[in-house]
Image (cartoon, grey):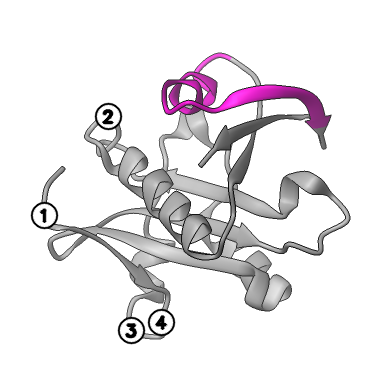
Amino acid sequence: MRSSLRLEKITPENVDAACGVKVGAEQERFVAPVVRSLADAYAHGEAAWPRLVFDGDEPVGFVMGGFDPLSPVDAFRCGIWRLNIAEGRQGQGYGRFAVEAVGAEARRRGQRRMTVLWVPGDDGPAGFYRQLGFRPTGEELQGQVVGELSL
């Protein structure tokens, strides 16, 4: 992995760059735009962990972890709530880096399991998450497959 990769907390200085991260048009049905994710992060307060993925000085992605150990929904207690890698930047390790960073934060918080939800369908993220070790739990929430990964 390149040493130039890093996550940054969303700040007034980089919020426009975060909102500029766009997936390809064919993927828009699988993930909310970053601006919606930031609204959700605001609404969820301390449970949301939104971060901008940089390669050097270039924003290449956005990831939002969620850490709400008291959530009544098991799938929302610890995991990836959103992942957007910019069009033209996918397949270069940025998504893996972001997922591993959320996993490291989860471990730092004492978690042993991480979840992710994905919309099923062609061109969707199922293969990506499975490649990283996530396995479907057999549960579906809001029309999305629930996947889990042991940390």
Q: Is residue 71 above or below residue 30?
A: below
Residue tagged 3: 13
Judged by depth in the image, the label closer to the viewer, 2 or 3, is 2
Which residue in the protein does label 4 denote?
A: 11
Q: Residue at x 64, y 77 (%)?
A: 46
105 relative to 113 in the view: left or right: left
Instruction: Assess whether mark 2 and mark 4 are in contact (beta carbons under 8 angstroms).
Output: no
Q: Is residue 93 above or below residue 56?
A: above
Mark 3 and mark 4: span between their CA atoms? 5 Å
Q: Position of residue 119 (x, y in %)?
A: 66, 28
Task: Read off the residue under disc 1.
Answer: 3
Residue type for callout 4: Thr
| Mark 3 or mark 1, whichever is nearer to me | 1
Residue 138 at x, y percent in the picture = 78, 20
Spatial distance from mark 4 to mark 2, Cα to Cα? 27 Å
Q: Residue at x 41, y 35 (%)?
A: 24
Q: Residues within 10 Å of mark 4 (few under 14, many from 20)?
A: few
